[in-house]
Amino acid sequence: MKKLWRWFGNNLIRVYAFLGFTYLFIPIAYTFAFSFNDSGKSNLVWKGFTFANWQNPCGAPDVCTALGNSIQVGLIATFFATLLGTLIAFALGRHSFRGRSTTNLLIFLPMAPPEVVMGASLLGMFLTFQINPGFMTTVIAHTMFCISFVVVTVKARIASLDPRLEQAAMDLYANEFETFRRVTLPLVMPGIAAAALLAFSLSFDDFIITNFNSGTMMTFPKFVYVSSARGIPPQANVIGSAMFFIALAIVVAGQIAGKKRKHA
């Protein structure tokens, strides 16, 4: 009995990690399994195994149109959120100016209220300026929502940098631009890439803010929500599973590239 308790004490973290990952991956496993369901239009009950859903992921009406809209909105919002958020992070992390503490506080404000409050507020702002909800309002809303997450992520990376590396570059007669281009930016780039991936995932996955500000435009989360009333088609499971594996491949590739750079 003592050996059992000793083993449990030594491996408690591993047990918690296993249970946590199991809890997280059960919905993913369910989604992936039901992507092979031969269910027709409704994917609530298992009716048989088939590869037809993967062979024709656009078989459900409007599913690929919704996916394309989500990808377009996500890419554009990610670009602007990453650009603006990175500039703000450098300003807050490397420069002292009047109102810096207030700006730090304001950065966190969009992350504090519930999404339904932010979505309704943005819709009210667009209607006040007589801007009809649609593609552009969705991009603007997603950009505003994602900037805070980009700033927090990139700023944390900037704070972890060793200033002696930049000082060494200066001692070797590199000017400020060369130091930034050859030393600072490569060191911060992993944080910027992580922030961009986070921004894209938040934008692609968002429903509440999108539902308020997209008008009649259909995105993938809206498609899933509307379809849930009559049964989500298996093609939605196919697309969801494919996006998960693509994201996983990107993360693994980034980890491998990072290890190669360390050993180079």
Image: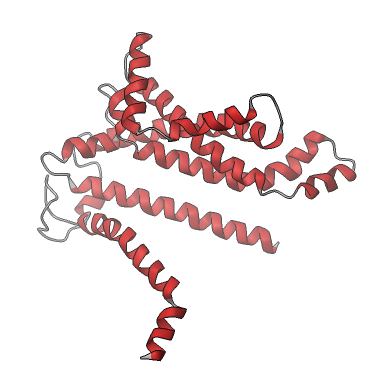
Rendered view: 21 above or below 175:
below
Percent position of residue 140, x then y: 43, 23
Q: Residue at x 71, y 30 (%)?
A: 96
Quadrant of image for the C terminus: bottom right
Percent position of residue 221, x then y: 28, 38
Q: Residue at x 31, y 52 (%)?
A: 241
Rendered view: 44 above or below 123:
below
The residue lying toward the viewer, choosing from 3 and 231, is: 3
Q: Residue at x 32, y 14 (%)?
A: 132
Rendered view: 182 above or below 250:
above
| Relative side of 133 to 35, left or right | right
Q: Residue at x 66, y 45 (%)?
A: 159
Rendered view: 245 above or below 41:
below
Quadrant of image for the N terminus: bottom left
Q: Residue 59, can we see it? A: yes
The residue lying toward the viewer, choosing from 37 and 104, is: 104
Q: Tell me, what colour scheme is on the image?
A: secondary structure
Percent position of residue 203, x then y: 40, 36
The residue lying toward the viewer, choosing from 38 and 55, is: 38
Percent position of residue 215, x then y: 27, 21
